[in-house]
Image: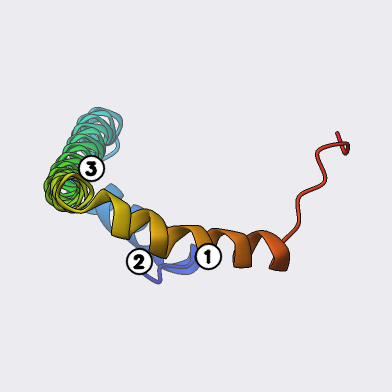
C-alpha cells in the first residue's frame, strides 16, 4: 500500500525521538500500536460484514430465481396435464412412434451394471 522502506522508517523514528523525546517515545508507540490494532480490527469487521451482506443478497436472488422456476414448472405441468386429459388417444398415437424411434436410436442394455 505505502511504499515505505527501511531508510524512511529510520528517519521517522529519528524525528519522532527528537520531537517526542526518549522518555515519552515508548508510551506513544504503545498508544499508536493500540490504535492501529483497533483500526485493523474495525476494518476486518467491516469487511466481514460486507461479505456477509453480499452473501445474503446472493442467496435472496437465488431464492427468487428458484421461485420463478417453480412457478414456470407448475404452469408447464398444468398445461401438459390439461392436454393429456383433453385428448389422450391422439397423444398416445403421436408419442408411441416417437418413443419407438428413440428406443431404436439409443438402445439400452439392462444387463450392464
Residue at image position (40%, 60%) is 93
Up the image or down, 101 lies above or below 49; here it is below
Residue at image position (14%, 50%) is 86
Q: Circle 1: is it few (<14), some (14-19), or many (20+) Cα within 10 Å? A: few
User: SS for tag 3?
Assistant: helix
The answer to whether 50 appears left or right of 4 in the picture is left
Q: Position of residue 77 (x, y in %)?
A: 20, 46
The quarter of the displayed image where residue 81 is located:
top left
User: SS for tag 2?
Assistant: loop
Which sits in the foreground, 21 or 109? 109
The quadrant the C terminus occupies is: top right
| Residue denoted by label 3 | 55
Q: Where is residue 23 in the image (x, y as percent from the top left)?
A: 26, 30
Q: Where is residue 25 in the image (x, y as percent from the top left)?
A: 27, 36
Which sits in the foreground, 50 or 44? 50
Along the polypeptide, which appears first: circle 2 or circle 1? 2
| Residue denoted by label 2 | 1
Which sits in the foreground, 101 or 77? 101
Residue at image position (20%, 34%) is 45
Residue at image position (35%, 66%) is 1
Along the polypeptide, which appears first: circle 3 or circle 2? 2
Tell me how many marks there are: 3
Q: Where is residue 26 in the image (x, y as percent from the top left)?
A: 30, 30
| Residue denoted by label 1 | 97
The answer to whether 98 appears left or right of 19 in the picture is right
Is label 2 or label 1 in front?
1
Q: How far apart are the two marked residues, 2 and 1, measured between alpha carbons?
A: 70 Å
Up the image or down, 107 lies above or below 60; here it is below
Which sits in the foreground, 5 or 22? 5
Amino acid at each position: 500500500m505505502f511504499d515505505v522502506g527501511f531508510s524512511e522508517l529510520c528517519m521517522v523514528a529519528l524525528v519522532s525521538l527528537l520531537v517526542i523525546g526518549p522518555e515519552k517515545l515508548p508510551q506513544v508507540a504503545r498508544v499508536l500500536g493500540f490504535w492501529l490494532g483497533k483500526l485493523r480490527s474495525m476494518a476486518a469487521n467491516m469487511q466481514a460484514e460486507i461479505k456477509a451482506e453480499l452473501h445474503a443478497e446472493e442467496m435472496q436472488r437465488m431464492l427468487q430465481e428458484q421461485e420463478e422456476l417453480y412457478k414456470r414448472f407448475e404452469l408447464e405441468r398444468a398445461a401438459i396435464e390439461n392436454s393429456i386429459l383433453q385428448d389422450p388417444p391422439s397423444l398416445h398415437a403421436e408419442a408411441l412412434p416417437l418413443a419407438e424411434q428413440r428406443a431404436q436410436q439409443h438402445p439400452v442394455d439392462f444387463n450392464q451394471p
